[in-house]
Image: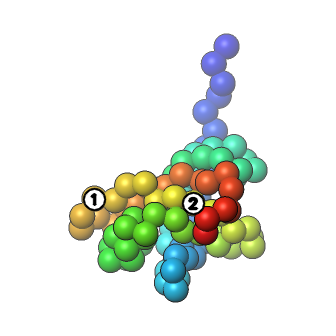
């Protein structure tokens, strides 16, 4: 029996990497604990490009949770980047 597809978790957050902080909108497909999953974020093109080049980043959600992420894809000139939630905070 196939599992029912859940609606994505959407909202706004602050994307942080190095010394940069940028507000973004996000959508996450994954379990509701947000311990794992994949998602997309929309924001400033240059900041998303820099986050992709950096790789490791964090999303500070409105509810106070901070998710360690890895930015895995961004097309030059696009206002959307894609990420995966990292299982550990090690190395960041």
Image quadrant occupied by the N terminus: top right
Q: Is residue 11 visible?
A: yes
Picture coordinates of residue 7, whole percent (x, y): 61, 44
**Helix or strand or loop: what does disc 2 sit on?**
strand
Residue 58 picture quarter? bottom right
Residue 8 visible somewhere in the drawing: no
Whether residues under marks 1 and 2 lie with C-beta atoms below 8 angstroms apart, the answer is no
Discs 1/2, front: 2
Q: Residues within 10 Å of mark 2 (few under 14, many from 20)?
A: many
Task: Tell me the tag on residue 69.
Answer: 2
Q: Which mark is residue 53?
A: none
**Residue drawn at x 37%, y 67% as measured from the top left:** 53
Of the pair 19 and 37, the residue shown nearer to us = 19
Q: Residue at x 75, y 50 (%)?
A: 33
Number of numbered callouts drawn: 2
Instruction: Say which quarter of the image contains residue 85.
Output: bottom right
Label 1 Cα neighbours within 10 Å, binned few <14 / some 14-19 / many ≥20: few
Residue carrying label 1:
75
Which circle's residue, 1 or 2, is located before the other in the chain? 2
Taking the view exactly as shown, the residue that stands out farthest to the top is: 1
């Amino acid at each position: 029996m196939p599992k029912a597809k859940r609606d994505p978790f959407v909202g706004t957050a602050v994307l942080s990497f190095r010394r940069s902080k940028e507000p973004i909108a996000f959508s996450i497909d994954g379990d509701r604990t947000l311990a794992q999953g994949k998602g997309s974020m929309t924001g400033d093109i240059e900041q998303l490009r820099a986050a992709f080049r950096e790789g490791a980043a964090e999303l500070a959600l409105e509810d106070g949770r901070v998710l360690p992420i890895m930015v895995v894809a961004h097309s030059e000139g696009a206002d959307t980047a894609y990420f995966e939630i990292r299982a550990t905070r090690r190395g960041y």
